[in-house]
Amino acid sequence: MTLAPAHVAGVGMVRFGKYPADVTLEHLAVGAARRALGDAGAPRTAVDGLYVGHVFGGPVAGQRIAARLGIDGLPVSNHENYCASGATALREAWVALAAGLHDVVLVVGVEKMTDRVAGGVRPDPGDLDAAVGYVMAAGHAMSARRYMADHGATREQVAAVAVKNHAHSVHNPYAQYQRPITLEQVLGARPIAEPLGLLDCSPISDGAAAVLLAGPAGLRRLGIDDPVPRVLGVGLVSGSVQSGTGDLNAEEVSRRAGAEAWKLSGVGPEDLDLVEMHDCFTIAEIVRLEGLGLLPHGGGAALTAEGHTTLGGRLPVNPSGGLLSRGHPVGATGAAQVCELTWQLRGVAGGRQVDGARTGLAYCKGGTVNGTDGGSVTTVVMAR
Amino acid sequence: MPCPASPPGDPQHVARPFREGLLSLDPPHLIGARCGACGVTTFPARDVCPSCRAEDAPAPTALSTEGRVHSFTVVRQAPAGTPVPYVLAWIDLPADDVRLMAQVVGPAPEDVVLGLPVTLELVPFGTGDDGVELLGHRFRATQEAPA
């Protein structure tokens, strides 16, 4: 089954970071949306529908955004899949275009976290893991400790993810942090959930990112004649209930999400020129790339330390700086990844450009559910 | 002795598990479910076997109280209201081939190691809306048997 691709007519972001309380979620979202419309040269009246991904935005955040943006009255839907919310909204928008329901749709991922979340994020209180003290950092810390024990990987190799992604972020004007960090800084940072420290963790952030998608008729409506990057397909899977006492880092859920992406897009893992990977924590980038089959199981940490996934390496991962540096306003991240892929595929990413980028993958993993290997996973495949 | 729930309005209460069907109190053990078709055991108990998806629901079963630490972390930062540090671990119960998440107590956090033998214990888990003490579960580093 292959649906028609969605054409990316325009993208826009506001810089991720910590904004004052009076800079609201609606304000951030409208800022990103206007930039995406401007990027496409599209009037507001060209938009058929709005798809919004957010987690902490409250009821009908999308409709609040639409009213502020001046596209009130249109079909608006809100999509919550925790950290995969923005990409899930994008998937639904892609499906609506492919189904012929709409010709031009706006996708906004947005989050205002710094005035309502502190100390980390945890599952819903109804989840058993939350009841016994689970916080997201703890899950990844246990993943890291087991990964190092099982594969002989070192703490330094895991920390290399943060050093690499921060080095990339120097060239990203939308990143919350745009400065390089050293291995010593990562290793010496305040412990959060051992063995992970502060610089192994993505920050709590505010931000928004927007993507204007169009079908063939939509491109004509917008007067876009030249080829633009395309979303070939968006995979979506959820974690499955685990049994037994097997490999804690098997990442079967990532393998399945990859399989969905390859099936929907017709692209294979060997075709990828770059990956925007959900590095909410350093170790997560490694085990998820391994789960996708893009790095050998158990070998990803060493390859990262050797530069395999650095700009200029065999498979650049997170040229944007990733969540660790760009920031992680959770509902916005999936849309921000698509902005980055779009800039990369247009060849306009400046100092962080992946030479000759033709095909890219964006991966998000959102939330946890007791007893499963994950909440939601999205895989966006794009090509120029 | 089984531990009955308090009748409504009865001020003379006994403690109960913080979630129904999660554990029994006397003797303390976790309640899992074992699939009659394929033999896989899960914790908590589930209505559908995740392994074979048999039509018949897995049957409740008392789980072994003896486990070992498969992985762990020392949580040093958590949202407000959660005292830190504490040790959170993946605990394997070899007798049941079950893995579950729980806190570990006993040694100082820096003395917890992979493979550490641990034993289930009950721990206060707050108070119910009706004033009844709630009990939950954690694991303690296994004590050497007295000579």
Image (spheres, rainbow, N blue to C red):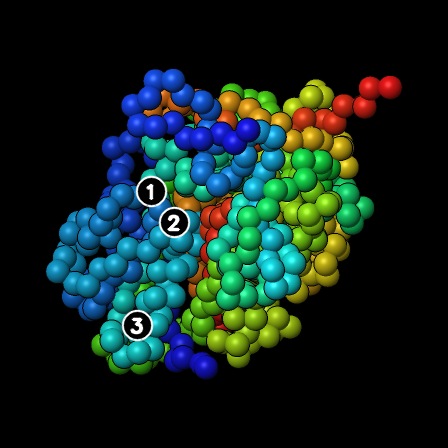
User: Residue at coordinates 51% horizontally, 58% vertically from top-left?
Assistant: B57
The Cα–Cα distance between marks 2 and 1, rounded to whole angstroms, is: 8 Å
Left or right of A37? Residue A246 is: right
Left or right of A366? Residue A20 is: left
Q: Report in which chain the residue with disc 1 lies.
A: A
Asked whether disc 2 touches disc 1, contact meaning CB atoms under 8 Å apart, the reply is yes
Q: Which residue is mark 3?
A: A96
Front position in the image: A130 or A156 = A130
**Position of residue B46 measured from the top left corner of the image (x, y, whole percent):** 51, 52
Q: Report in which chain the residue with disc 3 lies.
A: A
Q: Which residue is mark 1?
A: A56
Left or right of B140? Residue A222 is: left
User: Residue at coordinates 38% horizontally, 27% vertically from top-left?
Assistant: B6
Q: Are marks 3 and 2 on the same chain?
A: yes
The earlier-in-sequence mark between 3 and 2 is 3
User: Residue at coordinates 16% horizontally, 66% vertically from top-left?
Assistant: A45
Identity of the amino acid at label 2? Gly
Judge whether residue A329 can be spotted in this image.
yes
The earlier-in-sequence mark between 2 and 1 is 1
User: Residue at coordinates 22% horizontally, 60% vertically from top-left?
Assistant: A76
Question: Mark 2, residues whose alpha carbon is within 10 Å: few (<14), some, or many (≥20)?
Answer: many
